[in-house]
């Protein structure tokens, strides 16, 4: 699988996990308190792992965009 295909899978998952964290964070009673404790904490771990995968897949873009190599001029 190529990077673009993996990003097409990872990005929507990342969006759903972020929305879930927001929903459970702002409205903990939405799922019930028992489910909230389970979902909010475990989904945070999964969100962190998916975020790391997202950053790893986009590292080349970040490097080229933010950390451009500076060229030295010859004297």
Image (spheres, helix red, strand yellow):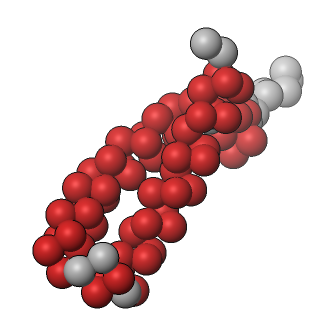
User: Which residue is at the front of the view, 9 or 63?
Assistant: 9
Quadrant showing the C terminus: top right
Residue 48 at x, y = what percent? 36, 49
Residue 33 at x, y = what percent? 18, 81
**Residue 63 in view:** no
User: Which residue is at the front of the view, 48 or 9?
Assistant: 9
**Quadrant of the rendered structure where residue 65 is?**
top right
Residue 28 at x, y = what percent? 29, 83
17 lies left or right of 42: right
Q: Residue at x 26, y 63 (%)?
A: 39
Residue 69 at x, y = what percent? 72, 31
50 lies left or right of 42: right
12 lies left or right of 18: right
- Circle count: 0
User: Which residue is at the front of the view, 62 or 22?
Assistant: 22
Q: Residue at x 50, y 67 (%)?
A: 19
Instruction: Residue at the far top: name it.
Output: 1
**Quadrant of the rendered structure where residue 35 is?**
bottom left
The answer to whether 23 is drawn above or below residue 6 in the figure is: below
The answer to whether 64 is drawn above or below residue 14 in the figure is: above
**Residue 32 in view:** yes
Q: Residue at x 30, y 76 (%)?
A: 31
Quadrant showing the N terminus: top right
Q: Residue at x 45, y 46 (%)?
A: 51
65 lies left or right of 13: right
């Amino acid at each position: 699988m190529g990077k673009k295909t993996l990003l097409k899978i990872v990005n929507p998952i990342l969006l759903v996990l972020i929305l879930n964290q927001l929903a459970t964070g702002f409205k903990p009673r939405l799922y019930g308190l028992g489910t909230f404790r389970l979902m909010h904490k475990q989904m945070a771990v999964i969100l962190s792992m998916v975020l790391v995968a997202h950053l790893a897949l986009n590292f080349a873009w970040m490097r080229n965009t933010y950390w451009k190599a500076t060229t030295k001029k010859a004297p």
